[in-house]
Image: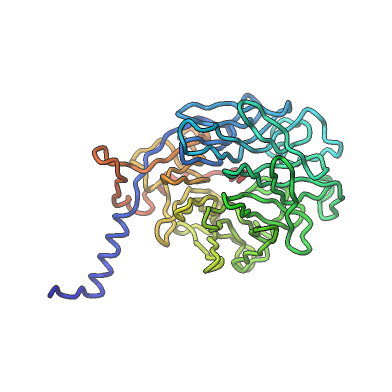
Amino acid sequence: MKPMLTSLAAGSLLALVAAAQTPRYTVTDLGNVGADGQPFQTTNNGLDVGSAMVGNALHAVAWYQGQMYDLGTLKGENSQAFGTNMLDQPGYRPGLVVGEAQTSKPDPDGEDFCSFTALGLLPSGSCLPFLWRNGVMYALPTLGGNNGIANKINYADEIAGTAENTMYDATCPSGMIQHQFLPVVWQFAVPHQLPTYPGDPDGSAMAINDGGQAAGASGTCAPSSPISAINLQPLHALLWENGTATDLGNLGGTGQFFGIEAEYLNNAGQVVGWSDLKGDANFHAFLWTKGTGMQDLGTVGSDVNSLAIGINDAGDVVGASLDANFNPRAFLRVGQNLLDLNDLLPAGSPLYLLTACSINRARQITGIAIDLAGNIHAYLATPVRDADSGASMWAVAPAPGSANARRPQLPRFQIGKR
């Protein structure tokens, strides 16, 4: 009979097993996207969508097989792509892309609904949700108002976002947004309004899965958020199913600091986002499941704030962890721990990964990074694979904190939208 392991030996063995299951990554530089550009979603078959500076304007773009494609605008100055539903089957249809785009028609109320002016970009007209298909960008209808945003699209072509109506919003600060904006799902290009938490006048559906569940937040009108770049103070993280809103709870905060927001969900109905902590002085990433409720995911090392931004169907979570000065670093959740994604890169990487915005089935991760000259780049991080077998290669990660010595100090940095 084999001898029993002592508790110490068993603990050491478990630690070694956990370390051996930590993936190593290589990084593909998707190019300089400018101060306000970034990718927002990566699909299972290699399509990435986001935004990049084109001259003095910000344009919706897509990356595919190493090439970046400008998706244009709705005849205005700026646009951004937030979601796509490119399918996995080779030779099927091209993916549909959704986002926000300014028009050439001035907003009658002078609203900066999509926060392009707040980002320091050139002013333009009203900002509308768009659907891009086969090289053409189409405006989606609102709830009667002048503005809206399309955030994500599922494989059934259902689109989650937010749209203005014509009702005056008394919660908006003077000179800001004038009208209510409400969470919506577009089906066949028709917007269907979703309920907010009782008493909340505004809200946005940030994501939608293939089962039609949507996740997002509701709250009050506010100045443009330094995290999500929308004019919402998110007070309640919500999950919508069959037209009913479920409040996902909080991590002790009221939402009056950086808010309580659901950012993404997978096809299992697992939801990620962030919540203010008790006292509303800091915020942490959360994972919500129907069985366990909202779980605090903590931070990387000694950081004080964190955001969960993406989750794949296997439950892998990615996001950003921030120190007391709001300097971010990308994280990947392995087991119960948030790991600095920079610690999983080869030594001497020319890019420092600031955020991890999306993770696909193959555990590829996209987000923004900074180079040695201080330029912002989009990146795609891919798990190292064995050249002979094609299987994932798992290896012990570098010592925690090894990337911290070159962690850039950023006197001004905006996490960016979604």
**Residue projecting furthest to the left:** 1
Q: Nearer the viewer, residue 238 or 326?
A: 238
Residue 272: image quadrant is bottom right
* Residue 129 in picture, x, y percent from top left: 71, 38
Q: Nearer the viewer, residue 145 or 305?
A: 145
**Count of numbered tags:** 0
Residue 149: image quadrant is top right
Vertical order, 147 against 277 (above or below): above
Residue 245 is left or right of residue 318, and the answer is right
* Residue 18 in picture, x, y percent from top left: 32, 59
Q: Nearer the viewer, residue 373 or 194?
A: 194
Q: Nearer the viewer, residue 305 or 44?
A: 44
Rendered image coloring scheme: rainbow
* Residue 265 in picture, x, y percent from top left: 56, 53
* Residue 332 in picture, x, y percent from top left: 44, 52
**Which residue is drawn at the image coordinates 41% and 44% (left, top)?**
362
**Which residue is drawn at the image coordinates 30% and 63% (left, top)?**
15
Residue 166 is left or right of residue 139, and the answer is right
**Which residue is drawn at the image coordinates 65% and 27% (left, top)?**
136
State the quadrant of the N terminus. Answer: bottom left
